[in-house]
Image (spheres, rainbow, N blue to C red):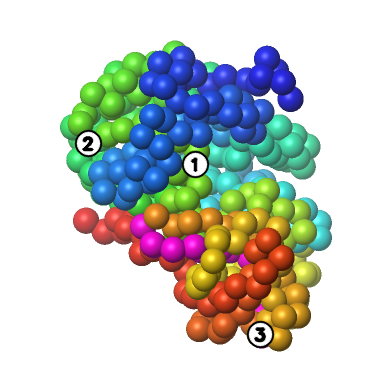
Amino acid sequence: MSTDDLKKTPLFDAHVAAGARMVPFAGYSMPVQYKDGVLKEHLWTREHAGLFDVSHMGQARLRGENPAKSFEKVVSADYQGLKAGKQRYGVLLNPEGGIIDDLMTARPDDDGLFVVVNGACKDNDYAIIARELAGEATVERLEDRALLALQGPEAAAVLAAHVPEAAEMVFMDAKALTAFGVDAIISRSGYTGEDGYEISVPASDAARIWNTLLEDERVKPIGLGARDSLRLEAGLPLYGHDLDETVSPIEAGLNFAVGKSRREAGDFLGAERITKELAGELARVRVNLKVLEGAPAREGADIADADGNVIGKVTSGGFGPSFGGAIAIGFVPPAYAVIGATLKVIVRGKPAAAQVVASPFVPTRYVRKL
């Protein structure tokens, strides 16, 4: 895709003005880093508050007589049991139990469900949902909205200065309210492992709100580079890398995304495979690796056992600035996924020692109670 073909978020001009290095991502021109660079942006978010443009993600309203019940045809989570003011993580499944996409779904008000999906997948996702739910529910894509993520230990104090109600929210709360003088949907969530919020606002007001937040000295703009290293340290899988249509939620360690009521009913796509995997019939599982020597193991690197036999692949990898070393996510047979086990990663043709460690690499700081 040429530069001219790339879409622009409502914040494109703000990124350019701030000196961002723009790169193609999910069909959009997006900031990978600003003047300070990825390392400093990563650490700033861990210590203060980072502001991310995630407007490339797909936002939609799902409406109908019982949109939650209809939605459960194609996703794994229990959305009929989702309480007002709450949000829940789930996965969109294919008939084989593979993950078409992972997504967040909220009930911020009485206007159906609010669904956010990954930017690179949104056209396919919404086409599938509309097709499978035809006659029962409608999908209204919210193309006129932007999405900002404010993440870090100082995010709550920053946002509360503008939206006092935000301070009363806990992790995975979602509310429709007036913020910055506009109708907003705010959830206390994110994909960095830090406390923070995702803020959906009208696209026409996005630049004003972005600049207002950046007036606070605790806030700096953060690009995709640091967003990736932050989510990697938090042990969070990324669609298109750690998740795809061949990977089931159980293989990916996302058992929580298959609701208890859904397991009992077995009424979702791919239930036969997923039920067997929940019972222990697994060929591979996601694993976190601490690389003990040499360069970081990147996506596509082989994972080998102690004797050098290839047993899996790295799906995400890099340097963890807060962790202080090289880390990776990959898939191996369950017998090798024992915490403390020593494996090898093949980097540039050379084996390097790696150890299986618990997830996350860096402790998460979600605020679950006030």
Horizontal side of residue 79 vs 96, given as left or right: left
How far is mark 3 from mark 2, CA to CA? 46 Å
Q: Which residue is denoted by mark 3 in the rendering?
A: 306
Callout 3 amino acid = Ala
Callout 2 amino acid = Arg
Q: Identify the secondary structure beneath mark 3.
A: loop
Horizontal side of residue 313 vs 84, given as left or right: right
Contact, CB < 8 Å: mark 3 with mark 1? no
- Considering only order in the chain, which callout, 2 or 3, is on the residue closer to the N terminus? 2
Tell me the magenta residue range: 322-335
- Give me the residue at 28% from left, 26% from top: 214
- Give me the residue at 41% from left, 22% from top: 19
Query: Residue 223, position in %: x, y?
Result: 45, 35
As drawn, the label of residue 8 is: none
Q: Which residue is denoted by mark 1 in the rendering?
A: 225
- Considering only order in the chain, which callout, 2 or 1, is on the residue closer to the N terminus? 2
Is residue 248 visible in the rendered structure shown here?
no
As drawn, the label of residue 218 is: 2
Query: Observer-nearest residue: 217 or 178?
Result: 217
How far is mark 1 from mark 2, CA to CA? 20 Å
Contact, CB < 8 Å: mark 3 with mark 2? no
